[in-house]
Image (cartoon, helix red, strand yellow):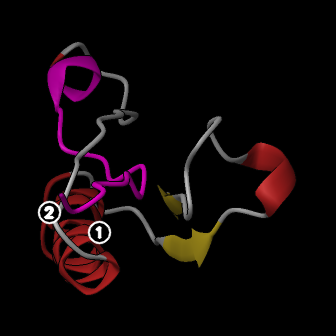
Amino acid sequence: MEQRRSLGASTSFVPALLGVPLAEGHTAHASYEDANAFATKIHLEVYNDFLVQVLAAPTYLGIKPASERFAGAINSMTAEG
């Protein structure tokens, strides 16, 4: 049985709908490569696009240090504007 792990990818826009451009979600995937590809796509094509195209905010994309990751996360990405 393959182990599934989370990258801490953000996939929820509920806070953004309330006027707060901050959201969080967690995903599970069959492989690290699949998880990384999905998280990177959401990071760039959803969050970065929302900050730039909707809020007209300059963005800072990055990877959080281990001390700021959720418990069990291999990677946590940030898109701040």
Q: Image quarter for residue 56?
A: bottom left
Q: Position of residue 13 (x, y in %)?
A: 16, 31
Q: Which residue sits at x=14%, y=63%?
A: 46
Q: Is residue 65 magenta?
A: no
Residue closest to the eye, 28 or 66 = 28
Q: Does 71 sit left or right of 35 as displayed? A: right
- Specify start and end residues of the magenta stretch as a single range: 1-16
- For the residues bearing labels 1 and 2, Cβ distance under 8 angstroms: yes
Closer to us: 51 or 78: 78
Q: Is residue 31 rendered to the left or right of residue 17?
A: right
Q: Amino acid at mark 2?
A: Val
Residue 36, position as x, y percentages in the image: 31, 78
**In which image quadrant can residue 20 be found?**
top left
Front position in the image: 16 or 71: 71
Q: State the residue at coordinates (18%, 33%).
A: 12
Residue 46: image tag: 2
State the image coordinates of residue 1 (x, y, percent, origin top left): 18, 58
Q: Secondary structure at mark 2?
A: helix
Residue 51's quadrant in the figure?
bottom left
Position of residue 59 measured from the top left corner of the image (x, y, whole percent): 47, 71
Residue 52 seen in this snapshot: no
- Read off the residue under disc 1: 43
What kind of secondary structure does the magenta stretch mostly adopt? loop
Q: Is residue 32 above or below residue 71?
A: below
Decide: is 16 above or below 6: above
Q: Identify the amino acid type marked 1.
A: His
Q: Establish if 44 lies above or below 21.
A: below
The answer for how far apart the CA atoms under marks 1 and 2 are is 6 Å
